[in-house]
Image (cartoon, rainbow, N blue to C red):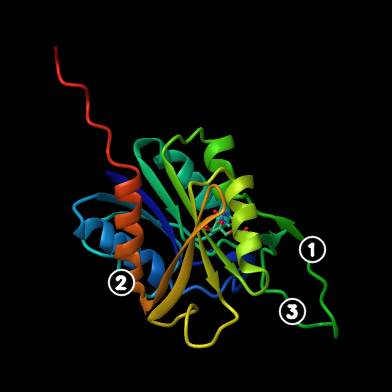
C-alpha cells in the first residue's frame, strides 16, 4: 500500500523572526513512516519542521505552514491508499505577517488570528479521498467523546486518541498509550509502549482492515 503521513508541527509566521507553533517533536509521525516502510509499504511523508532525520526510503515533502501542508497533501493524497494525519497543525495563524521585526514599543500587543485550513477535515470533502483515513485526537479533557466526534465529523475510519494531560507519555517522550476509536463506538486500547511499538500496531491494524485491492484475475 502507499501511505501518506503528515508529521511534526507547523509554524505560522508573525514577522521575519517569530512564529506561532505547537508542541510536536514529530516522533510519532516518523515512527509511523518507519513502521510502514518496514512492513513493505510505500510512504509519502509531509513533514513540518522537526529535528529528526526522516526514515530513509520515504518520499519527503518538507513544509513550514499549515497552508503549505494543506497544498502538499492536496497534491499527493490521490495516489495513496491510506492517510494518517499525525501532524500537530496550528489551528490559527496571524491575519497579517509583519515585513519587519515587530518592536516592543507597548506594554501589550494584540494579535489578530484567523483559522488555518483543516487538512484532515478536507480529505473527504475537498480532496475527495476514498482510501483509509486516520487522524489523531490529542486532548486534555473528555478524550473519547472528542475522538468519536472527530471520527464522525471528518469522515475518518480511525481516530487515535491520546490523553496529553498525562505526564511521561505523549509530548516529546519516547512512549505513549493510545486508544483506537472506530466507527460504531468501537474502541481498542493499545497499552503503554514505545512510539515505535505503537506505530507497528497501528500500521498492522490498518493493513489488516484495509488490505490492498488486488486487481481481478483475467477470465
Ligand atoms: O481538531 P484537532 O486539531 O484536534 O484534530 C487533530 C487531527 O486533525 C490530527 O490528526 C491532525 O493531524 C489533524 N489536523 C489537520 N489540520 C488541522 C488541524 C488538525 O489535519 N488544521
Residue at mark 1 to residue at mark 2: CA–CA distance? 41 Å
Label 1, residues with CA under 10 Å away: few <14, some 14-19, many ≥20: few
Residue, disc 1: 112
Secondary structure at badge 3 equals loop
Please tell me which residue is depicted at 74% across the width and 79% down the height of the picture. Answer: 103
Rounded to the nearest whole Å, what is the CA distance between mark 2 and mark 3? Answer: 47 Å
Q: Is residue 57 visible?
A: no
Residue on which the image places disc 3: 103
Above/below status of 64 relative to 26 = above
Q: Which-is-in-front pick, marks 1 and 2? A: 2
Q: Tell me which label, 1 or 2, sits earlier in the chain.
A: 1
Determine the image quadrant of residue 165.
Answer: bottom right
Disc number placed over residue 175 in the picture, else none: none
Query: How many circles with numbers are drawn on the protein?
Result: 3
Please name whichever residue, 184 or 97, is drawn nearer the observer in this view of the structure.
Answer: 184
State how far apart marks 3 and 1 are (Cα): 17 Å
The answer to whether marks 2 and 3 mark residues whose Cβ atoms lie closer than 8 Å is no
Q: Position of residue 102 (x, y in %)?
A: 72, 74
Tell me the residue that label 2 is attached to.
Answer: 197
Of the 4 image quadrants, the one containing the C terminus is top left
Asked if residue 43 can be seen in this view, the reply is yes
Q: Secondary structure at mark 2?
A: helix
- Of 25 and 188, which appears nearest the observer? 188
Amino acid at each position: 500500500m502507499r501511505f501518506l503521513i503528515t508529521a511534526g508541527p507547523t509554524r505560522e509566521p508573525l514577522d521575519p523572526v517569530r512564529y506561532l507553533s505547537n508542541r510536536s517533536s514529530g516522533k510519532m509521525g516518523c515512527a509511523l513512516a518507519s513502521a510502514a516502510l518496514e512492513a513493505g509499504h510505500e510512504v509519502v511523508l509531509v513533514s513540518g519542521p522537526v529535528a529528526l532525520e526522516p526514515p530513509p526510503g520515504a518520499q519527503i515533502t518538507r513544509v513550514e505552514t499549515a497552508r503549505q501542508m494543506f497544498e502538499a497533501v492536496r497534491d499527493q493524497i490521490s495516489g495513496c491508499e491510506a492517510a494518517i494525519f499525525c501532524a500537530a497543525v496550528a489551528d490559527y495563524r496571524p491575519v497579517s505577517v509583519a515585513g519587519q521585526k515587530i518592536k516592543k514599543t507597548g506594554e501589550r500587543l494584540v494579535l489578530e488570528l484567523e483559522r488555518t485550513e483543516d487538512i484532515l477535515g478536507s480529505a473527504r470533502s475537498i480532496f475527495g479521498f476514498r482510501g483509509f483515513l486516520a487522524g489523531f485526537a490529542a486532548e486534555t479533557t473528555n478524550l473519547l467523546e472528542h475522538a468519536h466526534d472527530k471520527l464522525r465529523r471528518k469522515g475518518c475510519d480511525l481516530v487515535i486518541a491520546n490523553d496529553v494531560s498525562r505526564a511521561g507519555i505523549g509530548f516529546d517522550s519516547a512512549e505513549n498509550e493510545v486508544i483506537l476509536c472506530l466507527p460504531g463506538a468501537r474502541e481498542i486500547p493499545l497499552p503503554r509502549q514505545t512510539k515505535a511499538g505503537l506505530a507497528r500496531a497501528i500500521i498492522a491494524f490498518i493493513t489488516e482492515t484495509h488490505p490492498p485491492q488486488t486487481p481481478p484475475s483475467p477470465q
